[in-house]
Image (cartoon, rainbow, N blue to C red):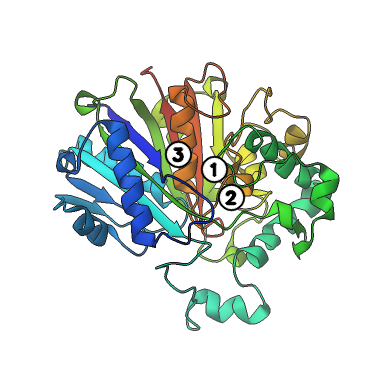
Amino acid sequence: MNPVIAGAAETDEVGRLPGHSTMELHLEAARNALADAGMTKDDIDGIATVGTPGPIQVAHALGITPSWLDGTGVGGSSFLFHVRHAAAAIRAGLCRTVLITHGESGRSRIGAPRFSTAPDSLMGQFEMPYGVMGPTTTFTLTALRYMKEFGLTHEQLAEVAVAQRRWAHLNPRAMHRDLITVDDVLASRIVAYPFHLLECCLVTDGGGALVVTSEDLARRDDPVYLLGSGEAMDSPMISQMEDFTTAKGFRLSGEAAFAEAGISHDDVDHLMVYDAFAHVPIYGLEDLGFVKRGEAGAFIAEGHTSPGGRLPLNTNGGGLSYTHTGMYGMFAIQEAVRQLRGEAAAQVPGVEVSVVLGNGGMFASAATLVLSNRLP
């Protein structure tokens, strides 16, 4: 029984959507994904999502009583976990067809929960008192150590944003499409050293949904196969990572996914790496094994991940230029599916294998999916 992504779609728009509540984003994405799959809600017997609303609330709103639910919440990588878990549940006979939904009013905050960190939590006790609070100040710890250890320059870090804007320039749905230069990035205001504004992810509204089922139940003639997957963790606190210059979760989840899929790096035509900040794709390239430690900055600066490069990366523009609602992993999967179907705005010729790497929290969780439009 081969698990496949049989439907994939985002909300009608992404960006600024003050007229949509969080629940509306979930439901609009679900409606679009079901239509894309040629299915209805009556075909669904499994639901997965993260946050508020959760799977019970989404299922109720859709009028579904599922036999399998997954509310795994590990940050922005959660949706990759959901794909992996859905495939396992289908193989085990626990359900037949799973709807995975995402909706987040990250910018407009309509129906979104409040941001809060309990003062008695680990972060509340051991990081926040020292001014380390939220992504902009936590991710700086890893970026600065990496720059010190490997000599990554500000110009090379800026090149990540420049490369991804080249892809966004080709994508009509991207929030920011104007081409930028390294000088533009370095001239944008400092948010938290060493990050300039253009090296930080967007804050947007939007959502997406996936329909995961078995190949025999898929109604499209171009299903996307899940060849391999992996999930892993590092530390709940960035200050307690074993090594600030590498993401253990990236490495372990990638190794598991590549082993299950039985592929090598040479088989990969397309790559999506979660990019909350400009240094995260650098870690992804190295921890997945595409380049050696300390070499990813130069690799990107040389144009290898840009349009026409030998390893197309974040071809929708990524969280830096396309959209970033707060939990970005759903949108990385969506772009991989589009590339494998040949439907992407910035389509890469001949994509047969796409790898998606998700990050949750500040390198706390990670998941990797190996997707293909064919079976080996």
269 w.r.t. 43: above or below: above
> What residue is shown at x 54% (from left), y 42% (from top)?
251
Q: Is residue 282 left or right of residue 338?
A: right
Report the residue marked by disc 2.
Answer: 247
Q: CA distance from mark 1 to mark 3?
A: 19 Å
Q: Measured from the top left, where is residue 234 in percent x and y?
A: 51, 56
The residue shown at (55%, 23%) is 269
Quick check: marks 1 and 2 in contact, CB under 8 Å? yes
Q: Which is more toward the observer, 139 or 277? A: 277
Q: Nearer the viewer, residue 274 or 58?
A: 58
- Residue furthest to the front: 19
Q: Label 3 is placed on what type of residue?
A: Ile
- Pointer 3: what residue? 333
- Tell me the amino acid under the disc marked 1: Arg
* Residue 127: % across, % down: 61, 75
Q: Secondary structure at mark 3?
A: helix
The residue labelled by disc 1 is 251
Residue 137 visible to an observer of this rendering: yes
Amino acid carrying label 2: it is Ala
Residues at marks 1 and 2, CA–CA distance in whole angstroms? 7 Å
Callout 1: helix, strand or loop? helix
Tell me, for residue 199, which label it has, or none: none
